[in-house]
Structure formats: C-alpha cells, structure tokens
Amino acid sequence: MAKSVAFTVNGGDSLYSYSKNSTFQRKAIDAAKELINEAVFERLDTESFSSSAFRVTDLGCSVGPNTFLAVQNIVDALEQKYQSQGHNSQLLELQVFFNDHAFNDFNELFRSLPADRRYYATGVPGSFHSRLFPKDFLHFVYSSYALQCLSKVPEEVADINSPAWNKGRIYYSNSEDQVVKAYEAQYAKDMGCLLNARAQEIVCGGLMAFVVPGRPNGVPHTQVFSNKVVELIGSCLMDMANKGVISEEKLDSFNIPLYMASLDEVEAIVKANGCFSIERMENLTQEQPQANVIASTLRSGMEGMFREHFGDEIVDEFFDSLRKKLEESSSVLKPLTSISLFVLLKRTGN
Amino acid sequence: MAKSVAFTVNGGDSLYSYSKNSTFQRKAIDAAKELINEAVFERLDTESFSSSAFRVTDLGCSVGPNTFLAVQNIVDALEQKYQSQGHNSQLLELQVFFNDHAFNDFNELFRSLPADRRYYATGVPGSFHSRLFPKDFLHFVYSSYALQCLSKVPEEVADINSPAWNKGRIYYSNSEDQVVKAYEAQYAKDMGCLLNARAQEIVCGGLMAFVVPGRPNGVPHTQVFSNKVVELIGSCLMDMANKGVISEEKLDSFNIPLYMASLDEVEAIVKANGCFSIERMENLTQEQPQANVIASTLRSGMEGMFREHFGDEIVDEFFDSLRKKLEESSSVLKPLTSISLFVLLKRTGN
C-alpha cells in the first residue's frame, strides 16, 4: 500500500541531528540571500500593505541554525528597506511563522530561538500543501529545501496491480516511464495545492520565494546529482534485500517521495494556478558535497522514515553501506548536474 | 540568590503528566464556560473589527485536554454569535495562538491538536508578562489557571541580607509581613507588565478573560485553601531538611512564585493601567479536591521545578510525603476558602 510519508528531520543536536548536518542546505540559503534582498527591495511594495506588522512564514522550516539564518536574511532586508525609505526600522513590527509538520521538533526550535531576534516568533504545525493561515494574512512566504518533498508517494507506484508499480526500486529517476509520470503528476498536484492555499493566504502584492534542489530544463532525471544519490540509497537497500537483511516485500513497498522539478515544470504549474506573476527564476549552481557529508545529511533528514519502514535494527548498517557506496561512486557522481532552483512569485489581484 | 523560575508542567501523557492530572483545573474551565459565552454574546462587538479573521490567544495554555477544551468554548461561542447575526459561521476564520513558556511541551500540543478543529492553530513561545504579538492584533485573550504564577520569586525574599528574607519558609502566606508585601508587589508588577503588553496587542473593543485561583476580598492569606496546600509543601521540605535529606541552604533558597490575589487587588491594578474597562468580576466557588488528586495535580505542575532545585533523587520521596501530609491535614483544609476569580476586561480607546 502507498503510505503517506512526511519528511521529518532528526531533532536535537546530537551526531546525526539535522542541526549538525545541514551545511549543504546552508549553501543554498547563502546563494539565495542576494536574491531575497533584491526581491524585498525591488519587488515588494511594502507601503501598499494595510497591516501595521509584516508577516513572514518559512514553510518546512525544520530545526537548526539554517532555520533562523534564512529568516534573518529576510528580516534584515526588510529593515534595510524601511530605513532606506526614511522610516525608523525600530518601529517596524515583524511576525515570523515557522511552519513544519507537527512531528518537527518545535520544542527544540522554540528553545533555540535567537535571544536578540527582532520579530515575534510563532510556530505553525501542518502540511504546507494545505491551508495554514487565514485569508490575506501573509506578506512574504519563504521556503528552502522543502518543496521537493511530495505530500505522499504516488499511490500507483506502490500498487502491485498498477502498470506503474515500481518493483525493486525506491524512486522514479531510473524507473519506467509510467513511474516517472506518476511522480511528475504527484508533484504537479502537490504544487497546485500549495499555490491554491498560498493564493488565499498571501495579500495582493505579497511575495513567495523558494529554493529547491532541481533539474535544469531538458536534462534527463538520470543526469541529476540528487537523483543519482537517491538511486544509490535504492541500490544499498537492494543489496540488503539480496542478503536477506530486509524482505523483498519491504523493499517493494518503499518509495521515496521526492521530486526534482525543472523551471519549465514550475512555470507551467504557476501559470495553471493563475494567481501569481513570475518575478524571477534562476538555476543556482552548487558544488557537490563530499560523500561523508552527503551521507550524514541524508541520515539527518531521512533516518526517521527508514526506522519507521524497515525497523531500528537496520539503520546503522544501512547508513554505513550508503556512505561506502557514495565514496565508491564519486566518479559516477562527479559529472552530474547539481543545481537549486530559485523561484520568486508575486500574488497578483484575482 | 533569587531565581527566575518558570512553571512548566510535565509533558507527555504518563502517570504524572499534566495531561492526566488536570481535572481540577478543568472544573474551573467548566465554571467559566457560561461566563465566556455571555462575554462573547454581550460584550464583544465583533462587527466593529476590521480584520476578516478572528484571533484568540490562550496565555499559559500548557498541554492537555484542558488546553483544547478552553479554546473550543470560545470558538463555539463565536460561531454561535455569528450564526445568530445571520452570518454563515462556515465563513468565519479563526486563528488560535497557544502561548506558554518555550519549555512547555509544544510538540505534544501540536501532535494532539483536534483533527476536526475549525481554527488555524499556532504556538507562541514566551512569557505572557512580555510582548508576544504585534500591535492591535488580538480580539480575545483568554487565560486559565496561569496568571497566579509570578514571573520570578521576589528577589528580597531569597536575599539573606534583606529584612524580607524568607528563612525556613518557601511561600508568603504564613510569613512575616515584609515577605507578604514583597510577593504582593511582585504580583502587582507582573500583572502591570502583562496588562501593558496586552493593551498594545488587543484591538480596541477586544476582550481579555481570565480565571485564576484566588482569595475573597478581605480574607487573610492564611485562610485560603491553595495557600495552605503550598504551606504543606513547605512543611514536607522542612521535614526533609530536618532529616538531612536536603540541606537547609537549599530550603532557604527555595521559594514558590505563586500569588493568590483578590478581586480588589486585581481591580486596583487594572485601574492603574487605565487601558481596560472592567466588564465583569466574579468569585467562583469550587469544591476542594481529594488529597491524592491535589498531590498528583501538584506533581504534574511542579515536578520540574523541584527536580531542578533539589535534584532528581528526592522527587518521589517528597511527593509521597506530600500526599500523606495532605491526607492527614484534611480537617485543617476543609474549612478553608477555595475560590477562583473570573475577570473580564475590555480594551478601551487610548
């Protein structure tokens, strides 16, 4: 059966916590910083908003230093803009809504909020594919390395009776066309839901900026670094199934709900929604991280999902073999494309 | 040294969790239900508010069934009022802000949110004695069994060089006059801060309702049930100090930051603030709970504080002896007054 799997990163601050293993995602935040700055200065008509406070949300914020860093970039840009307009930025009231699944470690998030923050902090539990806020509430929606997560595995790929059944694999990128299409359709549906929800929540003129790992237009799914990494996860699991450590059935019923979209795909979905103008789209190139960094990053983000599906006892063995496989595969990974997409949308009138 | 101690109830849902030990507080919520209903119907001019969504906060919400029950009472009243005005209550958007210290178990709170709730749920970490929201943001502020907590122990009662040093005692109610005055002053200061903060955050015409354990006007502190219970805590600790289980120094440096105010005191503080009209004040009488219920209720609410000050090893012994002492003291407790205060304030123009 297809399962609805939520990505929930490891909480706390121990060895495999997301907190300690998110330098890769941090680079994407740094790369987006200047773009966020420009978005606030050039595309945001702050003086047209009627509310006295400015409301920002970080969708899929997870927990760790990145969470606060990304938000601080937005806060800094807003304060600078207010100052440049001759206002006293001390009077600007900012409210930040940290959103993630209810299984995110909000306790850790709340306890590690920067003491010197210049905003009112709130937590919003729930899926960003659904409504989270009242109408016309938000001014700036941000999301970093979260919107590549599907709301669930497409049902047909885990359905033994479907032509899209993904037997022996855990991902779409090197699978049959029907599997790819199922993932593609799930992504379009999820992003459609997300845009519908945000279209109601974002005030007219408000912005939405997101960064996700992606795929350059026209490049096949198999040639994308992140996809190859996920395939290696599958290959480790297949090895373990062959050795009898996990059952074939467990393997067949496991699929990873991620999708690496291209800007063309995103553009088509935004246009179909019709409530946003596309203000900017960029491919951000990024360095490939080292094998051990990839392994720890994946563990901090996916350990919970593996524990739940395969049981606690395989976790160490699995992530060990994954690290080894990543090291052995460096020559295969090297030539692959590794990019993030940056997308900036503005809520237009209805 | 005086310490800033935050009351943080036991999370989770185990034997001594607040979740499982809050039927006493539940009764106060039930008693306030009708009063909340009347407040919403008779004192709240919902049609004068410009925001389309209605914003409610529960200050010191803690975690457990009571948290959701109290909020549901307000939500139900608002929906009924909208219906009675000929509106479609399905269109009413409600946003609920659950507030408590950052050390409250927000993970538990978020994971136990009612699935069928008709409001957008958010968590707000921080002290309700400080600002938590932007200006003119809230329509209804509610608090149940939280505002009796002081922001800290008054410094002088833990200062060996002060005439208000509270040697050998852990509370004010049977202490020297100077100790009582120090607690009284801390309460007035804390409530002053709370009202100042809320005066900025509540829209003109918005309401604030709270229920706290209290003291009838004119009744001495020593004649109040809750105070006597806290004195018994002190007496157990003194026994343990005499037996050498805890040091005298530990005992002398421990004070419980609670205060049982009377309506006269609350009225004076509200008038000094000047931003609120008093719409209603009531003494709600309540039954005294059984000794074992009191003991578990206290444990669920104060265990963390005892662990932090006296160490893990004394906790079981202490709460055991407290339960026994409460049982033995039933004839002393019986004739004492046990009431809650209900206070309803409205934010007036500046």
Image (spheres, coloured by chain):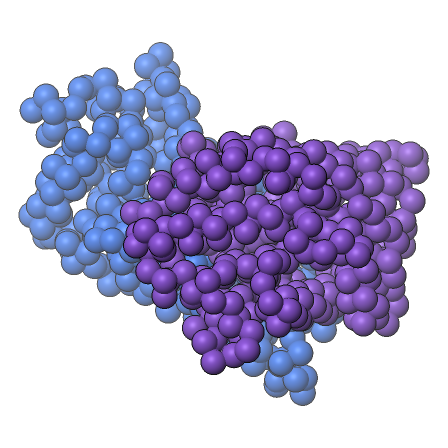
Chain colours: A blue, B purple
Tell me: A326 left or right of B56: left
x 30%, y 54%: residue:
B244
Residue A101 in sight from this viewpoint? no
Quadrant hosting residue B49: bottom right
x and y percentages locating residue A2 in the rendered image: 38, 23
Q: Residue at x 36, y 45 (%)?
A: B315
On screen, residue A50 above or below A244? below
Residue A228 or B248: which is nearer the viewer? B248
Residue depicted at 87% across the width and 34% down the height: B83
Residue B154 at what x, y percent from top left? Answer: 56, 70
Q: Quadrant of residue B92?
A: top right
Residue at image position (56%, 81%) is: A80
Where residue A306 appears, x then y in whole percent? 26, 34
Q: In front here: B234 or B154?
A: B234
Query: Relative to A254, is A93 above or below?
Result: below
Q: Is residue B205 left or right of residue B151?
A: right
